[in-house]
Image (cartoon, rainbow, N blue to C red):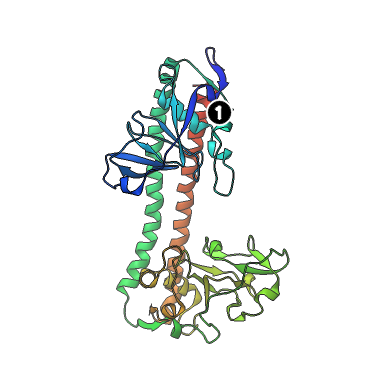
Amino acid sequence: MKAGWETKPLGEIIQLEYGKPLDASQRKSDGLYPVYGANGEKDRSDTFFYDKPSIIVGRKGSAGEVNLTEARFWPLDVTYFVTFDETRFDLQFLYYLLSHLELPKLAKGVKPGINRNEVYAIDVATPELPEQKRIVAILDEAFSGIATARAAAEQNRQNARALFESHLQSVFSQRGEGWMEKTLEDAVDGQCSLSYGIVQPGEDQPDGLPIVRPTDLGEKTIELDGLKRINPSLADSYRRTTLRGGDLLLCVRGSTGMIAVASDALAGGNVTRGIVPIHFDNTLVTQDFGYFLMRSAPIQQQIRAKTYGAALMQINIRDLRNLILPIPPRAAQAELAGTFESLLEDTQRLEALYQRKLEMLDELKQSLLHQAFSGQL
């Protein structure tokens, strides 16, 4: 640590003041002043509670998150706001310091919350005010560059995904000779009931029956690893959704419209409520092509149009069975599916590349904060 730095409990440097409730009648979207919740601006109001720039620290919910405020603001009761001696400490320096401390790790409880006394007890080292301002100038410049690089990486990631979706959309919008339309119910094979699972998750049983839940539908292909396993008797009463392997798994509750593929290793497994297994009539639609068909814009738009519910979005089975599918000639499906798969793999590689770049930028930011508050800048 450099000479001139002093170590003391954080409670001797800042005070965390409680925010206050604000009645709905005093909130308005075009209000003059921001109303802050635990993780940033929540609303606006023509009334303010505090008239100096400060730092909001989430107290409940997004506990420990930190945000700089405007000059006048209202902090809600799920927050703390920071007060301090302005003759000895720089606001931006304290903001960087609190960001460095990773306060969310102090959160406890079902609805995470942090106790300000635990925050006060953290020992921190701080220099004199001129040195604080010098460090802030360095961090401001560095973080500005990181923010620009991060925005570019995020945009590139989105562009990679949009390129795939654009190609998929163009094929299904232009179509061609020999395309036909059928309902989903008419396009599946005789063993596919188009029913959603009713299996209850139950207790985890290491060697039991694998089940797929809506929360498992992240990757294109669902493998055995990481799946919950249950007593097989829990699925005995609902065999219509027993998986055969290669099933398309469509989410119909929550992330409605999300689609994945059950690997062959899942044959004999089952699904919980919220997932409908799909097996196409192979003379009409191959499973490989069917995956891209079900995630295409014409199908997803129909699903969104039929989705209902506020707290939990869902589509009922009758509407699902009546989805209209645009189907190209069977002979063309293998080539189309191959093209889609190749482009999807390229897209996923690019997304992974840009995601890693985002992670590296975040790591760089934390490294700079560590250097700043260990006296190395």
Quadrant hosting residue 146: top left
Left or right of 73? Residue 129 is: right
Q: Is residue 162 above or below residue 33?
A: below
Question: What amino acid is found at the position of numbered circle 1 in the picture?
Answer: Tyr
Quadrant hosting residue 104: top right
Q: Position of residue 236 (x, y in %)?
A: 67, 79
Q: Residues within 10 Å of mark 1 (few under 14, many from 20)?
A: some
**Residue found 57% across the figure and 41% down from its top:** 107
Q: Position of residue 358 (x, y in %)?
A: 46, 43
Near-viewer residue (344 or 250): 250
Q: Is residue 70 above or below residue 265?
A: above
Quadrant containing the N terminus is: top right
Disc 1 designates what residue? 120
Left or right of 91? Residue 364 is: right
* Any part of residue 327 in sight: no
Near-viewer residue (310 or 302): 310
Q: Position of residue 261 (x, y in %)?
A: 53, 69
* Any part of residue 235 in sight: yes
Q: Is residue 45 above or below residue 238?
A: above
Q: Secondary structure at mark 1?
A: helix
**Residue found 27% across the figure and 43% down from its top:** 31
**Residue found 30% across the figure and 38% down from its top:** 47
Q: Position of residue 174 (x, y in %)?
A: 30, 73
**Residue found 53% across the figure and 83% down from its top:** 193
